[in-house]
Amino acid sequence: MVDLIAQPESVEEEKPRRDLFAWAWRGLGNPLLLVGVSILLLLVLLMGLAIPQMPGQYADDAAASSRWLLTTQAEYGSLGSLLAGLGLFDLLHSPLLRFGMFLVGLLLFIQLGDQLVNLERHRKLPTLLAAPVSGPGEPIPLPGTLPIYRWRTALDRPPDEMAAVIDSRLSSHFAPDPAVTLRDLRVPIPGLAGEESQTTETRWLVQGRTWAAVLRPLFLLGILVVLAVLWVSVVFGWAVTPPVLAPGEAFHFPRRGLTLTYSPGSPAAGEGDQTAVLQVQIGDASKSLPVAQGSYARLNNASIWVERAAPGLFLSSEGGATFLLPGQSRASTSQGFVFPAPGSEESVLIPEAGVGVRMVRLPDEDAFLLEVIGSGQGDAVQRLEIRGDENLSLPLVQGERAGEEATLGIHFLPGLQVRVRYMPGDWLLWLGVALIVIGALGYWRRPFFTLVQLSPWPRSRSVLVVQSDAPEPLRMLGKEEAA
């Protein structure tokens, strides 16, 4: 048994030029750096999701935002100051988040550049197979910044004999794979000094799974598209999360031209939960959303989420009675309330009837305690537990219709939690996701190439040069033995 191709003592990666740009590019192009920065950015996002976020409507109100921050920060004690300093209570405007996104984008651009260089190298390899060299044993220059593994050794057999051996080994190792292309070519090159003026070099090129090299840049491009959309959303987008809306309540955000109106529909017909709608207006566009179930809609490039939140009651009157909230002077013929937790209570005055109504949410989510208290009396005139829509008759003691009876309608309607988010170009997220899915297929199998050069060497020997983007082909050629 004779080792026809000597085993290399070590397979070394070709070192790039020692200049500052190449050093910086190589350092920033390290995939581990991208993974590390991405993990840190993900941790920042998770921390932001785990703590309360400033409502978007406070972003342009310095006084309101300061009050909200001070109140929320105090709930976290000494840790609150650190969280506020990092901007984690307002992630959309956090400098830390923006810097992290910029850094991840920069590293992705460098990775994408390397992938495109790798793709260009794979594209040019068939033409480089015939590239001229200065003499035997000189490797063909390969473009790009990605690592090249190179091995050069002298063999004790003439080129014609070694060519048959190498061709057999490459064919037996790579040819069974249909995704691998094997090419060979004999190229005239200059001879060594003192030898013939020209000699012939035999070359082999093995390329495998080039399709993966084409798909891989799409993966990084898709991530960049998603990151770009998020960056534009952080800089130019906005989000508004108003307090839970009670039935009949409206919310206005003039700076964005946003108006939310919770219309109770036709509660008198006993179908308030089915006919109630949330009317959304953004600029000149408007849309009505049902509240019977949670819903999602798009309006003026903004996304709107509507969810049923805490239980609520909507009071309406017929027959001349009006409602007056404690501390207010303006009466209305209807009023809505939200009860966020068991034990929550609300009250309202009915001046024409000379009574007040106290409502308490019971532990059972679908039940309320209702007390009608007369003017100047400490005890309730009427107390009842309600589990559905009710109508109460109240005698009027004041006003133009004194002596008549008014009907107090009590209707079960939920409070609504509404979120409105404007993300410019958010439809591009689907394009980014599609590119990521397609590009991920390129990481299922690894593309590779191996370029082999065999030249004559003095005293009936030959010189072998092997270049590859992976060390395995070099070791494969180095460890094969034949009789």
Image: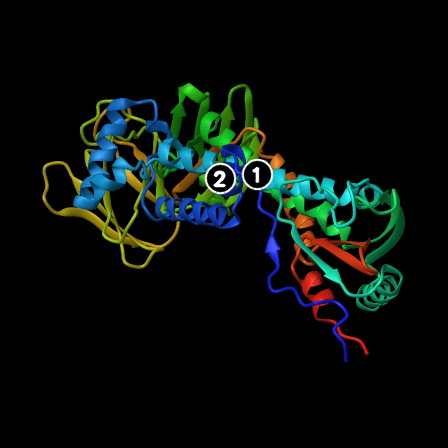
Q: Quadrant of the N terminus?
A: bottom right
153 lies above or below 288? below
| Residue 151 visible in the current orientation | yes
- For residue 417, which quarter of the picture? top left
Q: Nearer the viewer, residue 228 or 282?
A: 228
Q: For residue 17, which numbered disc appears in the image? A: 1
- For residue 337, which quarter of the picture? top left
Q: Earlier in the sequence, mark 2 or mark 1?
A: 1
Q: How is the image coloured?
A: rainbow
Front: mark 2 or 1: 1
| Residue 55 in the figure: left or right of residue 11 | left
- For residue 334, which quarter of the picture? top left
Neighbour class for label 2 at 10 Å: few (<14), some, many (≥20)? Answer: many
Q: Residue at x 73, y 40 (%)?
A: 120
| Residue 349 visible in the current orientation | no
Residue 99 pos. (x, y %) = 41, 34
Q: Quadrant of the C terminus?
A: bottom right
Q: Nearer the viewer, residue 359 or 237?
A: 237
Q: Residue at x 45, y 40 (%)?
A: 267
Neighbour class for label 1 at 10 Å: few (<14), some, many (≥20)? Answer: few
Residue 357 pos. (x, y %) = 23, 41
Residue 282 pos. (x, y %) = 50, 24
Q: Nearer the viewer, residue 441 or 244?
A: 441
Q: For residue 483, which numbered disc appears in the image? A: none
Q: Amino acid at mark 1?
A: Arg
Q: CA distance from mark 2 to mark 1?
A: 26 Å
Q: For residue 104, which numbered disc appears in the image? A: 2
Q: Provide the secondary structure element on which disc 1 rests.
A: loop
